[in-house]
């Protein structure tokens, strides 16, 4: 029945699009005309409406950050960008953005990197009307102030107390999404209501938008296999020039043995070539040794037993898939 879940989500998205916040369009028009004060007021009204979905909410905070920065309200711009980055850690401004806007964004990005992204869990409660419990795992800057559940025209919003909130919908309601919201009720992040776990057991649906770890994005030069291959290539190069140098020495001996048949210049040319090939051979073997040492160090780092390390294990369920996430620090 997973198709029915997707259908419900599509209906919810269509409804959200049909009730697009009119203040957003007016704010964009004001921005196009560089009427920043008017755009700021429209964005404030759009957020105060409290009926925006996660994508719309993130966009509103991005625009609020840009407008506040343009108006010289730097601290407010940093706060708005920080909310955007808490729900979209990979968010970036377009290349060529004015320093007046990009500098507050960079401050917000550093703050968001230190605090981590917004994260929560969702549980379905055993009660006759549809009811849920939302538990916030990480709330950077306390941007999440409430929990929210949508079911078509019905909506439940409950303030977070101690990082938790319970939501109850009318008995006939068909909930579509459950998530966490800002102080106005705008959804910051949400999951399908069907993916919330039963409170009596099972793993809860979780939203944790942590960006990929630096280890997952390692440079190609940090892999031992690359250096091992380089060591083999350098050794082969050294062997090639070593063989050439030996052949040059043998030829030089023949020239010396029949010196009456050769010019002195021929012997000098052969001697120079032999020395050049010997030097290249030594360089190749030296580079091979250095590359092999690096490969061994990286191999030990990647594959040696790590008995003393601590591992973080967390069950993850969502979109019809289940698994276990294991994080092992290096």
Image: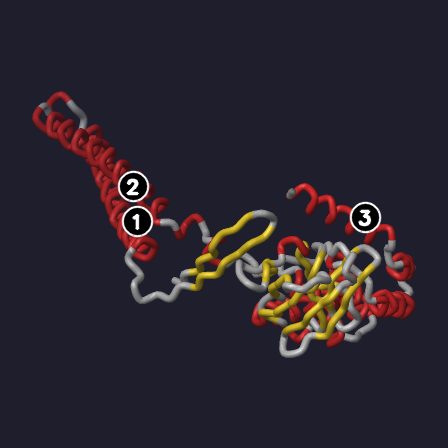
Distance Cα–Cα, label 1 vs label 2:
8 Å
**Labels 3 and 1 touching (C-beta < 8 A):** no
Residue with the mark numbered 2: 234
Q: Secondary structure at mark 2?
A: helix
> Is residue 12 placed above or below 261 in the rendered structure?
below
Q: Quadrant of the C terminus?
A: bottom left
Marked residue nearer the N-terminal end (3 or 1)? 3
Q: Secondary structure at mark 3?
A: helix
Q: Which tag is nearer the camera, tag 3 or tag 2? A: 3
Q: Position of residue 219 (x, y in %)?
A: 45, 51
Q: Is 58 on the left-hand or right-hand side of 118?
A: right
> Is residue 163 placed above or below 268 in the rendered structure?
below
Q: Residue at x 70, y 62 (%)?
A: 128
Q: How many callouts does the rendering have?
A: 3
Marked residue nearer the N-terminal end (1 or 2)? 2
**Labels 1 and 2 touching (C-beta < 8 A):** yes
Residue with the mark numbered 1: 291
Disc sitting over residue 14 in the figure:
3
Q: Position of residue 242 (x, y in %)?
A: 20, 36
């Amino acid at each position: 029945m997973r198709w029915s879940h997707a259908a419900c989500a599509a209906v919810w998205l269509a409804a959200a699009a049909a009730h697009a916040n009119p203040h957003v369009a007016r704010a964009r028009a004001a921005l196009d005309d560089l009427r920043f004060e008017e755009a700021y007021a429209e964005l404030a009204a759009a957020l105060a409406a409290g009926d925006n979905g996660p994508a719309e909410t993130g966009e509103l905070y991005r625009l609020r950050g840009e407008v506040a920065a343009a108006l010289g309200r730097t601290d407010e711009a940093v706060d708005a960008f920080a909310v955007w980055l808490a729900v979209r850690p990979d968010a970036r401004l377009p290349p060529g953005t004015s320093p007046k806007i990009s500098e507050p964004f960079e401050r917000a990005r550093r703050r968001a990197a230190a605090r981590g992204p917004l994260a929560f869990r969702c549980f379905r409660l055993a009660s006759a009307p549809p009811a849920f419990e939302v538990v916030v795992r990480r709330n950077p800057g306390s941007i999440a102030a409430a929990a929210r559940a949508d079911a078509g025209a019905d909506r439940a919003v409950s303030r977070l107390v101690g990082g938790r909130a319970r939501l109850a919908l009318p008995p006939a309601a068909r909930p579509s999404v459950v998530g966490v919201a800002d102080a106005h009720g705008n959804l910051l992040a949400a999951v399908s209501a069907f993916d919330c776990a039963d409170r009596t057991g099972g793993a809860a649906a979780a939203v944790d938008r942590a960006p990929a770890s630096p280890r997952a994005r390692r440079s190609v030069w940090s892999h031992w296999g690359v250096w091992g291959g380089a060591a083999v290539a350098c050794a082969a190069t050294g062997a090639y020039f070593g063989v050439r140098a030996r052949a040059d020495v043998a030829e030089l001996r023949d020239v010396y043995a029949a010196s009456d048949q050769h010019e002195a210049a021929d012997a000098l040319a052969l001697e120079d070539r032999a020395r050049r090939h010997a030097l290249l051979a030594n360089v190749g073997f030296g580079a091979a040794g250095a590359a092999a040492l690096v490969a061994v160090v990286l191999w030990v780092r990647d594959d040696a037993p790590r008995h003393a390390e601590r591992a973080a294990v967390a069950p993850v369920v969502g979109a019809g898939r289940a698994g276990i996430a294991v994080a092992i620090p290096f």
